[in-house]
Image (cartoon, rainbow, N blue to C red):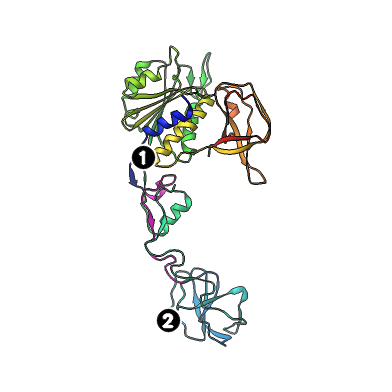
Amino acid sequence: MSVAEASRILDAGVAPLEAEAAPLAEARGRLLRKDIRTDADQPPFDRAAMDGYAFFPEVGAARYRLAGALKAGEVLAGAPGNGEAVRIFTGAELPRAGMAVLIQEEAQVEKGVLVVNRRVEPGENVRRRGMDARAGDVLVHAGTLMGAAELAIAASVGETRPVVTRWPRVAHATTGGELVAPSESPGPGKIRDSNQILIAALLAGCGLPGDLIHQERWGDEAEAAVKRLGDEPFASADIVLISGGVSVGEHDYAARALSEAGFELRVRRINSRPGRPFIFGVQGRRLAFGLPGNPVSHFVCFHLFVRRALARLAGAAPAGLVRARLAATLERAANPRPTYWPAVWSFNEEGGATARALPWGNSGHLAALAGANALLLIPPNTAALPAGAPVDTLPLA
């Protein structure tokens, strides 16, 4: 099955999660589901745009008596009259409609009198009430990813619990009796488990994170895996990730375990290098992914499919391919399958995107991922690509 066909099947099996009102501190990275509107004009009053002196410009007048000072958050007991000026600071409310602000760099003050040496127009250096938005205007539209700016906008209008998509709950198991914790010294035939930290970091950094509620390691017993899939927290997870055990070997039990746990397996293998063994299953609204155990395959399948599912669950559009130019010649043995090659993606001085293929040998070559921020799509049966050739890339951030 092609990556494109597997993606279509995935899209058909994934619906956005329900929305919930979340505290601002917990809304970052989520998709907004209800417009954020301002509860008042923005700014809510005429305010000084810069430090200076506020006065009502009068034709022919050049001297204004200072009648006080005004900081942001303060108000004057009485509005200054004609012929009077107020020392004012950035953000302070103007005490009288139609006033102007002469910035302090242009101001000349002599014995308590502001001397104005040029024509000043009403409203100069003033941020007028409602100039940014009127009460009821939409400031952040539904469908926007909540980042730092969007959170600040919500706070500025008192929207302390925006309505956003619920984060999916993700439970993850790595499989294989050969795995030990990274803190352990591997004995004969053993290797350290790198896929747990890989999945945790990918979920946290893919832009549409899932809530990783649990990770554990499984041995090579299929019956034990089936039982765990029926227990908490796997039983209530929105996404179940299984690392390894997805091929057709005697000890590869992921497909059997997911089937016996009630998942309908809709994808079993994809035409891709790396990452050919791959499982996608559905049980109601729950999703399951079986990722090949080799770390580069793991990395590629996560970005092709799990990241896509996270976007769909959030109600967002999944990341797409971006055209770039190859930074240096890439020579390789031709392969009948399309290859997703680890690469470094960047903009050049002319503003175009470039992609540099990283040294990579096989699906277990974990060190090849160091510095990778993109996957370079190499068409099947392609032996070499010259520098400057147009290529499709999948940026990973």
Tell me where residue 105 appears, x and y as whole percent.
Answer: 62, 73
Residue at point 42% right, 79% down? 77
Name the image quarter holding residue 310: top left
Residue 187 located left or right of residue 173: right
Crowding at dot 1, Cα within 10 Å, few <14 / some 14-19 / many 20+, comes out as: some
Tell me the SS state at disc 2: loop
| Stretch of the chain drawn in magenta | 23-46
Q: Is residue 112 magenta?
A: no
Residue 131, x across and y down, in percent: 46, 67
Residue at the spot of label 2: 78
Q: Can residue 44 be found in the magenta stretch?
A: yes
* Residue at image coords 55%, 71%: 51
x, y percentage for residue 378?
A: 58, 29
Quarter location, residue 118: bottom right
Lateral position of residue 160 relative to residue 55, left or right: left
Q: Residue at x 54, y 78 (%)?
A: 121
Question: If you read the primary sequence from the N terminus, does the residue marked by circle 1 or circle 2 appear first?
Answer: 1
Amino acid type, callout 2: Gly
| Residue that badge 1 annotates | 16
Q: Say few, some or many: other residues with alpha carbon within 10 Å of mark 2 (under 14 / 14 to 19 / 20 or more).
A: few
- At label 1, the amino acid type is Pro
The reply to whether residue 259 is in sight is yes
